[in-house]
Amino acid sequence: MAEGISEGKLLFLLSAVQFINIVDFMMVLPMGPDFAAGLHISTARLGLVAGAYTGAAACAGLLGALFFDRFDRFDRRSALFVCMTGLVIGTSLGGVAQGLGTMLLARAVAGGFGGPASALALAIIADAIPAQRRGYALGRVAGAFAVASVVGVPIGLKLAEVGGWRAPFFSIAGLGLIVALGAITQMPPMRKHLTSPGSRPVAPRPLTDFVTDTTVLASLACTAFLMMGTFALISNLSTYLQFNLGYSRSRLGFLYMVGGLCAFFAMRAAGRFVDQRGCR
């Protein structure tokens, strides 16, 4: 248990962070045909909108690796609040976009803050949750991906259908602000990465130690290929289903719900398996 907060409450807050982050990213993909029509964007260029988010997230993650563990004044809680606030701003900008350029800018801002927010949430788990329960904790927080598919995306699609494509952006931004405030007010300071068990400062490992570690490189490569394969399909899935297969726009939420339910149970089972058997 992290000092000053129960383990369950901490995991709930971190799951909420991941939920907002994932819904913010995922809802844009099935909504692509909606805002493409409203902004007069060719559907062939919708992949750029998804790419702006992921590209900015990747760049921000690399930059963040240089200094996130070197915060002497700001702990992980404060860094998480800053990143969530930036994500809220980027999402709000998407709601006022006027064309492809402004939408790309908005998604880049959202990704530039959303990517590090996701990484910080996982880092807090590593700091606060004992190793014997860490797999379950990671599976539970990763389950936010599934909840986003089951609940967030269908609701976002319905909001776009009823209130226009801008409505989901502002709705997610509002929820994100609530989560950001919840994190900064409910979490205790997260400074374990700055001190040793004896409360003495710890010098962060040089970044070169990580980029030359074969285990780290293998993990990064697996993550990269998984994300590339997944989002190469997801970014075009809604457009393909509607315009190539004639699938009804009103039933898109059902597909995301089914996929999310499968992922929800699979992630929880995988987390418990890792705790019991190890990750190798």
Image: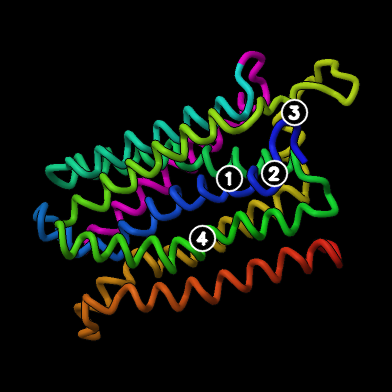
Question: Which amino acid does the dot numbered 3 rest on?
Answer: His
> Mark 4 vs mark 3: which is more N-terminal?
4
- Residue 125's label in the rendered image is 2
Question: Which amino acid does the dot numbered 1 rest on?
Answer: Leu
* Residue 49 within the magenta-colored segment of the rendering: yes
SS assignment for the magenta stretch, majority: helix
Mark pair 4, 1: CA separation: 12 Å
Classify mark 1: helix, strand or loop: helix
Mark pair 1, 2: CA separation: 8 Å
The reply, left or right, for residue 272 in relation to residue 247 is: right
Is 52 drawn above or below residue 109 in the view shown? Answer: below
Q: Which quadrant holds residue 262? A: bottom right
- Residue 145's label in the rendered image is 4
Is 198 drawn above or below residue 162 in the view shown? Answer: above
Q: Which residue is mark 3?
A: 193
Q: Which residue is mark 1?
A: 14
Q: Position of residue 203 (x, y in %)?
A: 79, 20
Q: Circles 4 and 1: CB distance less than 8 Å? A: no
